[in-house]
């Protein structure tokens, strides 16, 4: 899965199908299971001191949040391959190789995509992550800067950027 600057989420057919199966499970069997857990815990008595009840309700809340996320994602997603950057610049959906501080012996290769892209065989960084946001728009050979968690800046050189063909 990748996101373009227009906030369109692109999913491969495989990723779309996987997320759709997860949504169907969460809205079907998983809802039935959690409702049964809540009902069983409710029968145990006083709800104020019932750890099983509160745990089941918390699990239900997390499950419903995931249902809303998946529903929104699948409704707005486009299935297919994200269009390649017309000017050759780094964009979501690309496999990017960088060199830290311009040192070509200290490199890293990653897919610039959202975490939902689970079928990837390469490490994935979100376009919204500091590194992801720092390299977007830069071309091969250019230096990019991003902010580290401690507030300092780090520099990387873009060595390669190719569309992901996973």
Image (tube, rainbow, N blue to C red):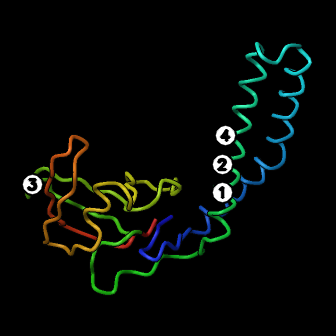
State how far apart marks 2 and 3 are (Cα): 39 Å
State how far apart marks 1 and 4 are (Cα): 12 Å
Determine the image quadrant of residue 90. Answer: bottom left
Location of residue 28 with respect to 14 vertically, above or below: above
Q: Which residue is drawn at 46% across and 77% down?
A: 6
Earlier in the chain: of badge 2 and badge 3, it is 2
Mark 3 vs mark 1: in front = 1
State how far apart marks 3 and 4 are (Cα): 41 Å
Badge 2 vs badge 1, beta-carbon distance below 8 Å: yes
Count neighbours of disc 2 (C-alpha within 10 A) and say few if under 14, some if 14 to 19, many if 20 or more.
Answer: some
The x and y percentages for residue 74 are 66, 65
Residue extending furthest toward the right: 43
Badge 2 vs badge 4, beta-carbon distance below 8 Å: yes
Determine the image quadrant of residue 160. Answer: bottom left
Which residue is disc 2 drawn over? Answer: 66
Mark 1 vs mark 4: in front = 4
Check disc 4 and report its element: helix, strand or loop: helix
């Amino acid at each position: 899965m990748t996101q373009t600057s227009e906030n369109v989420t692109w999913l491969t057919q495989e990723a779309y199908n996987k997320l759709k199966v997860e949504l169907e499970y969460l809205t079907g069997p998983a809802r039935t299971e959690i409702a049964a857990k809540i009902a069983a815990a409710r029968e145990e008595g006083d709800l104020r001191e019932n750890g099983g009840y509160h745990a089941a309700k918390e699990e239900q809340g997390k499950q419903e949040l995931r249902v809303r996320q998946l529903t929104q994602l699948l409704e707005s997603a486009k299935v297919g391959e994200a269009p390649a950057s017309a000017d050759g610049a780094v964009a979501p959906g690309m496999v990017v190789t960088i060199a830290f501080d311009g040192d070509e012996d200290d490199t890293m290769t990653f897919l610039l995509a959202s975490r939902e892209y689970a079928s990837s065989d390469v490490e994935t960084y979100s376009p919204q992550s500091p590194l992801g946001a720092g390299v977007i728009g830069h071309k091969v050979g250019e230096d990019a800067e991003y902010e580290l968690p401690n507030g300092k800046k780090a520099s990387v050189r873009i060595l390669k950027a190719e569309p992901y063909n996973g």
